[in-house]
Image: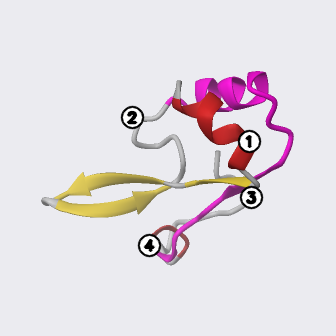
Amino acid sequence: MTIQLMMPHTRFIHVKDTVLKDGKPRFVLPGESGQIDYRKLLRLAHKAGYRGDINVEVSGQVWNQPDYNPIAAP
């Protein structure tokens, strides 16, 4: 499995998410697209021995939106 192969070389995990809107990629909050099972991904990484940092990127395409609330963001 890819996660098991990469864990010995992984220093941190960086996550972000994207959707296609009008045929163009648009960054969204991680998990918003529903395409990546982050819970499963992180469980597999932990099972493979990962104990490092996880960086969640909130793109300017997200935080520049007038209704973005970093406290309420899921």
Position of residue 46 relative to residue 13, above or below, is: above
Q: Nearer the viewer, mark 2 or mark 1?
A: 1
The residue that label 1 is drawn on is 8
Identify the amino acid type marked 2: Gln
The residue that label 2 is drawn on is 35
Identify the amino acid type marked 4: Gln
The residue that label 4 is drawn on is 61
Q: Nearer the viewer, mark 2 or mark 4?
A: 2
Within 10 Å of disc 3 (Cα), the crowding (few <14, some 14-19, many 20+) is few
Q: Nearer the viewer, mark 4 or mark 3?
A: 4
Q: Residue at x 54, y 48 (%)?
A: 30
Q: Which residues are magenta?
A: 37-60
Front residue (pair 4, 24): 4
Front residue (pair 9, 74): 9
The quadrant where residue 57 appears: bottom right
CA gap between label 3 and label 1 equals 34 Å
CA gap between label 2 and label 3 equals 24 Å
Q: Earlier in the sequence, mark 1 or mark 4?
A: 1
Secondary structure at numbered mark 1: helix
Front residue (pair 56, 13): 13
Q: Is residue 38 visible?
A: no
CA gap between label 2 and label 1 equals 26 Å
Q: Earlier in the sequence, mark 2 or mark 3?
A: 2
Q: Residue at x 14, y 60 (%)?
A: 22
Identify the amino acid type marked 1: Pro
